[in-house]
Image: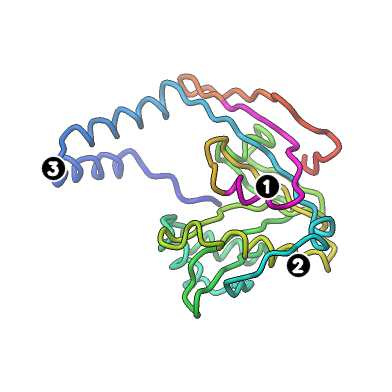
Amino acid sequence: MFRKRITIKQKFLSWASLFKYSSNKLLPIFIIFRFIFQEIIYYNFLCFIFYLEFKENYSSIKTELKYEVKLVNDIDLIYKCFLGAGRRLSKDDIRKWILLKYHCWMAFDEDVPVGAVWVWFGNCHLPSYSGKCFSMNNVTLFVDSIGYECFAQVQNKYRGKGIYTSLLTNMINYYSKTKISGFVTTMGATNISPIKVYLKYKIRLIGIIRIIKIFGSLKRKILFLDERYKYWE
């Protein structure tokens, strides 16, 4: 249910075009080496798991919203918004997520979509490294009252202008009046920008997980996990 994995043939075609059109011939060599090293030899991913409770944050919100935020289920609009922000989601996946009643929140600047984020519920297919932070299984089951926030994307020219803050604030306002009490999310330790936004709110760090891949073998090491807020299986 994530983006379709790029085949080796597609990779080779991509690399061939890099060699053909790149003025710096060392760049494609570096990209190929990095791919081989991370995919085959060694990859180390340090991940934080955060929990944000909606009602706890609702009364403390003082942020002035600059952008209109809406719940969106228009497949083409979602596809174009994420593509414009640098992430390609397949329309088939988007359609499946909407049918599963996952929520896509989108921020607009005068009717122009400039950023979006998903909130998933229940059984979630999470084969990525971030998903492995919850479990080594590809499917993670979240309890009914908890959502999983993922795929937060903002267009480059709008980064640092409060888009993600507007998205989070609207989500808190909306969900604080529903049966959804909060959500969990995962972030790579080097993903500084969204972490800085999160620190504006009453948020709990509930887990620190390290995922290590050595010659194709994955290992998950729990450095810290607050079992009181483990809302998944």
Q: Spatial distance from mark 3 to mark 1, Cα to Cα?
A: 42 Å
Res. 23 mark:
3
Q: Is residue 141 left or right of residue 55?
A: left
Q: Amino acid at mark 3?
A: Ser
Q: Position of residue 41 (x, y in %)?
A: 41, 21
The relative height of residue 19 versus residue 144 in the rendered view (above or below) is above
Determine the residue positioned at 14% across, 47% down.
Answer: 21
Q: Quadrant of residue 136?
A: top right
Q: Is residue 43 left or right of residue 61?
A: left
Q: Amino acid at mark 1?
A: Leu
Determine the residue positioned at 61% across, 52% down.
Answer: 150
Q: Position of residue 158 (x, y in %)?
A: 46, 62
Q: Which residue is mark 1?
A: 199
Q: Which residue is mark 2?
A: 173
Q: Which residues are magenta?
A: 194-211
Determine the residue positioned at 64% across, 42% down.
Answer: 186
